[in-house]
């Protein structure tokens, strides 16, 4: 898996307000940061609902950036030295293997999936459906997330990359926002376009 945003549907009102819905894939460790933006509706995969075998299929996340420890909430540009980087990645891989083994063992013991799956959190990808509406006619959906996460390099690197995935998706379909048809089941004045 990789960080992505795949558009599902988009529409525009006669006044020019745009709405966009898509499937998002992000590392589970940045879910809280993405969820801070209240201008979006979203529904994410739940670890409480996934059998452990299915949760294990969503493993494989490895950090994009291994920055040095420093003051503040985010490690910035400076990364670990090469030897420390290799060791950090080896520790991460060993932890993933151990988390998988222990989660499987807990599931075999009959422990509830919402607890057994928690050991996997650092290594999981998360998928969900997100919808956002532009705040002004002609504006972009997801404008708040893009403003706070895409413009600054001082944000969590995975959230930064996700905001750029949304921006790329919007750029690809922005011309199509003019090509809407009105299905029979929508009232007059509403337009809808299914993205393929």
Image (tube, grey):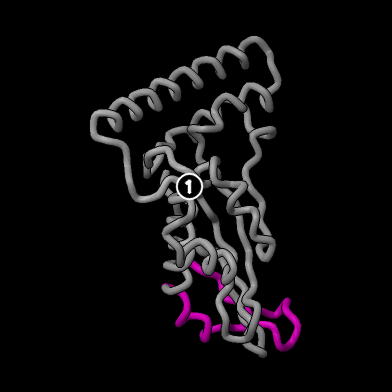
Residue plotted at (51% across, 35% down):
124
Residue 142 sits in which quadrant?
Answer: bottom right
The residue to which callout 1 is attached is: 74
Left-right relation of 170 to 47: left
Is the stretch drawn in magenta largely helix, strand or loop?
loop
Residue 87 location in percent, x, y? 31, 25
User: Please, which residue is most extreme toward the right here?
Assistant: 187
How far across and down, in percent of the image, does residue 154 sit?
45, 56
In the rendered structure, does residue 78 fall within the stretch colored magenta?
no
Q: Nearer the viewer, residue 125 or 154?
A: 154
Q: Nearer the viewer, residue 4 or 148?
A: 148
Number of numbered markers: 1
Q: Residue furthest top?
A: 109
Pinpoint residue 1: horizontal percent, then vertical percent.
Answer: 42, 43
Residue 110 occupies quadrant: top right
Report helix, strand or loop for mark 1: loop
- What segment carries the magenta color? 172-196
- Which residue is pictured at 62% across the width and 43% down the height? 45
In the image, is 136 to the left or to the right of 167? right
Q: Picture coordinates of residue 106 (x, y %)? A: 61, 14
Q: Is residue 25 left or right of residue 192?
A: left
Q: Nearer the viewer, residue 150 or 22?
A: 150
In this picture, is 176 found above or below 169?
below
105 vs 171, left or right, is: right
The answer to whether residue 20 is above or below residue 90 is below
Given residues 168 and 193, the one toward you in this image is 168
């Amino acid at each position: 898996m990789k960080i992505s945003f795949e558009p599902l549907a988009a529409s525009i009102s006669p006044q020019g307000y745009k709405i966009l819905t898509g499937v998002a894939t992000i590392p589970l460790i940045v879910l809280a940061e993405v969820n801070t933006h209240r201008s979006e509706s979203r529904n994410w995969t739940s670890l409480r609902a996934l059998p452990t075998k299915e949760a294990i299929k969503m493993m494989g996340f490895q950090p994009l950036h291994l920055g040095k420890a420093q003051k503040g909430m985010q490690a910035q540009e400076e990364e670990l030295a090469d030897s420390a980087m290799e060791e950090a990645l080896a520790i991460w891989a060993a932890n993933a293997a151990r988390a998988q083994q222990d989660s499987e063992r807990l599931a075999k013991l009959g422990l509830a999936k919402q607890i057994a799956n928690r050991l996997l959190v650092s290594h999981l990808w998360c998928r969900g459906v997100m919808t956002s509406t532009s705040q002004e006619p002609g504006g972009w959906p997801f404008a708040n997330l893009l403003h706070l996460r895409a413009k600054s390099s001082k944000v969590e690197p995975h959230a930064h990359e996700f905001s750029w995935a949304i921006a790329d998706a919007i750029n690809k379909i922005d011309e199509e926002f003019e090509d809407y048809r009105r299905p029979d089941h929508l009232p007059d004045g509403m337009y809808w376009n299914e993205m393929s």
